[in-house]
Every structure is written in structure tokens, then in C-alpha cells.
Amino acid sequence: MTPKPFTLEAAVSGSEIALTAFEPYLQEGAHLSIAGGTLGLDGNLDLDGQQEPLTGTFSGTAEVAGLAVQLRDQDNRLLSWQTLRLAPIEYNVAPARLEIGTVTLIGPRVNVVSNASGVHNLAQVFRSGSEGASEERSDDDPGFIFRIEQLMLEQGEIAYTDRSIEPVFTTRFDQLSGSVTGLSNIPPQQGKVKIRGRVGEVAKLDFSGDLGTLGTDDVSQMELVMTELSLPELGPYFGRYIGYEVDSGKLNLDLKYEVTGTRLDGTNLVVMDRLELGEPVASADAVDAPVSLGLALLRDRDGVIEVNLPISGDLSDPQFNIGRVVMRAFVNVLAKAASSPFGMLGSIADLAGFNSNELGQVSFKPGSTELAEGEPAKLSALSSALLDRPNLLLSVRGGVAPEADGLALLRKELTAGGSKSLSEGDWQAARQAYLAGERTLPPEALNNLASARGRAVRTVLLDTHEVPADQLFMLDPSRQASLDENGAVTVQFSLDVR
């Protein structure tokens, strides 16, 4: 029998409706319990007579007050708020469509906890397979459609606890206020977000960006700026990944992210001011590198460390944690700096295009303390880096290449420093005798040249470029220096930290 059509027009109004009555419906798709909250409605319901599917509209306003929700079998609140107001509401039963003018959310509190395995409690909310019904929709059925013109946030708070590290890390984002406009799951849609607040009761937070259509692969671009965050608050992460406590310092962040679907790609400009490490911490995850040297390479003369850290990941992965990813990226930069110090200097300072191999050594003409062609510019660039990083110490190891330097010194001896002529035949005979060990130089000649080259480098850095003497050290000269591709003799440098 075909159902008889009917129509219904009615005013719908109610207040103080206990939300616990709806808990069985909530638990069909989520591991949640309702600990408190009331619902209020005021509007008109208009059912137009069709039953399969049922069609009609609701127009009005709604308010949910005093909500408190927690994961089942847990006592800690997951989500709560003082008031959620929705006005005006236009809801169409079939096809399902919801349009809200303004959502006002006052005093929301979210408690995010990452367990010892690194999985946060938000990942435990939904039951597996609860969204399976959406996969059965045909391509012609758009499913549930919604649009929200604006969401106004007042005095929000997020508590975050990370139990995957020791000691446990906790922080709080509070005084979160702002707006989100243009939210929808139907393209084309371009929303905007702008929220400000605090972190750790001191640091300032500013979150803004453009939002694509929700639930699609539209691109959303967001920026998070955080200033004046106390670095000791991040001590547990430094202890785990760097192996030291943090004694002092401030952190500024400028995070720019692009989200496509669940894929996140971004850059993180990290600025640390006056970072000072504390006591060592035993950690199996700590970087195996000279941390102090790495920090000295990154820190400029004003005590500021500034690095740009690109990251990427999948937001749908329960173990993806932006904070930990950024920390690991910083540790990687630190380890790279410590393991290739001259390479790091070349990447963070204006060193005239010299690569790490070139910066770690300087070349001399054979038999002489005269720098080879192009080498003075290298020392000038290296001096600039040392002046900008006063905690770095440069050690210079003079050296000689016995064959190349010995022959050059022999030729100088035979020509009296170039004042006498020497035939090619006489030179070849003398050369062969020297290489055969039948002719020798004074025993101190090569040693003196090796030491003189070290002193020559120090003099250029100290007198010409005004590098402080307490940043320069001399090492025992090498008697087996190498030659570069042009046949010049190279003197090696090494870096250390105070």
C-alpha cells in the first residue's frame, strides 16, 4: 500500500534538553560518553508530504550549553564548552543540506593526550568502519552538504600532554579567539581563518590562512606564528633528541603549511634566541654528534640561531606529530652542522661560493708561504664567518708536501732565490739526484716551511681580517700535506667550540 501523503507545519521549541539522552546514537559511531550538556531549540519544522524519502525543512536557532564529552571508560574530559550557538539554521531533510549563518563557540576546552606509543586520544574517538556508509554512495549522490558562513571562537583552550617522552611534556594553548569564515564541503569554496591566543601563558600565537573545500583535495594554505616561547618548556624534547636539558632561551616560530587532502607540506622558520643547554640527559634517541659544535655553527654573534626546516607528512597517520617532526628536522640540521662544519658555514654565511672542501683548507705555492691564486678571498670569507660566530675556534695545521716543496726549495737554493740562472740540463740532473736521495736539503728546511705556513695563515686572519687571537690555534704541522688539482700544497683547518 502506498503511504498517504501528509504535511506538517509546526513550531519546535525546547530548552534544557539533556544531551545524555542522545548518547546511544553517538556511541554507534564513536567511543564517546556524554558527561553533561543541554540542548535548546527554537524554530519551525515543515514536512511537505513526501515520505520516501522524507522531505522537509527546519528553520531556526539552536544552542548547546555545558557540553562535556569523554572517551568511554576514561574519566578525563576530552571536549567541553560553555556555549555553542547556531543562528540562523536552515536544514533540508532530503537531500541533506545544512546552512548556518553564525556559529558562536564560547569557552571550548580540548584535552589532547599522546600515549606512550605516540598515538593521541583523538585517534581513538571514531569506531573503525563507522564511515563505511559513505563509500556506498553513488557518484550522483552528493551526500550531506553543509555551509557555515562564519564561526566565532571566544576564549578557547587546548591542553596537550605527550607521554611518549620522559619527562612527560605538557603545554597549554589558551585565550584562543578569532574567526573562521566560508566553511563548506561543496566546491568552489574558499574559507579564511584568523585566530590568536597564547602558549604556555606567555608566548603569543597567531594562526591565519585560506581554507579549501572541506573533505576534498582542495589546497589549504595556513601560517602559524609563535613568539616569545620559553625554550626550557621544550626541555623533554631536547633531552630526548639532543641529549641535554635546556637552561635558557626563547623560541620564535613562523610555520607555513600547505595541506592537500591529508597531505601536509610546509616550511618552519625556527629562531632560537640565547639557547643555553643544561645538564646531559641519557637518551637512546639522542643525536650522535658534537652538539655544542653544531650549535656554535648555527648561532650568530648575537646569540641567535635561525634555521628553515621543511617537513612533510600525512595528517591521517595517528603517529604523525608536527612538533616531533620539526624537532627531528632540527636535530638533523644540528648533526649535519657538527659532522660537516665547513659545509654548514658555506650554507649559512656569505662565503663567496666556496664549498665545504675548499673552506676546510687553504693552498700555497710550492716551496713558499705565498698563498695560491684565489686563496686570499677564501680566508676573507672564512674570517667573516668566524667574526659572526665568536664561540667557534679555528685550528690551523701548517704542512708541507715533501716532494713538491722539496723540489721548489732546491730550485730556490740553486738559483739563490731566483737571482742566478740555471740551465734545464743542470736542473734535471739536480732534480733526479734529489728524488733519488743523493742530494738533500738542510734538515730543518721543510719543518720551517711547514710551521711558517701555519703562522702565515694566522697572521692574515689576525692582522688583515681582525679575527680575535683567542679564536685561533696552531696545530702540529703535517709533513705529508696533499696537493690540489693545480699542484698547490694544501694546509688543513679544523673547527671546535669554546
Image (cartoon, rainbow, N blue to C red):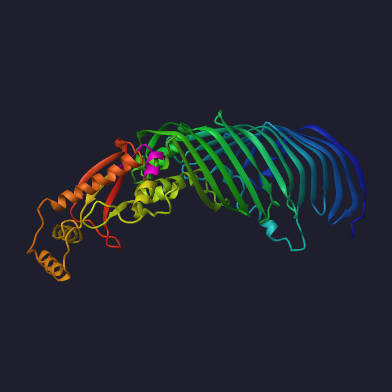
Say which of 243 and 5 sits in front.
Answer: 243
Is residue 243 visible in the rendered image? The answer is yes
Picture coordinates of residue 91, whole percent (x, y): 82, 46
Q: Is residue 386 magenta?
A: yes
Q: Is residue 483 magenta?
A: no
Question: Given the current orientation, which residue lies at the most extreme bottom position?
Answer: 425
The image quadrant of residue 424 is bottom left
Left or right: 146 in relation to 468:
right
Q: Which residue appears at 73% of the width and 60% of the height?
A: 137
Q: Is residue 292 above or below residue 435?
A: above
* Residues shaded magenta: 383-394
Say which of 130 and 482 sits in front.
Answer: 482
Picture coordinates of residue 294, whole percent (x, y): 38, 43
Left or right: 243 in relation to 226:
left
Say which of 283 and 38 sits in front.
Answer: 283
Q: Which residue appears at 91% of the width and 46% of the height?
A: 8
Picture coordinates of residue 141, whole percent (x, y): 77, 60
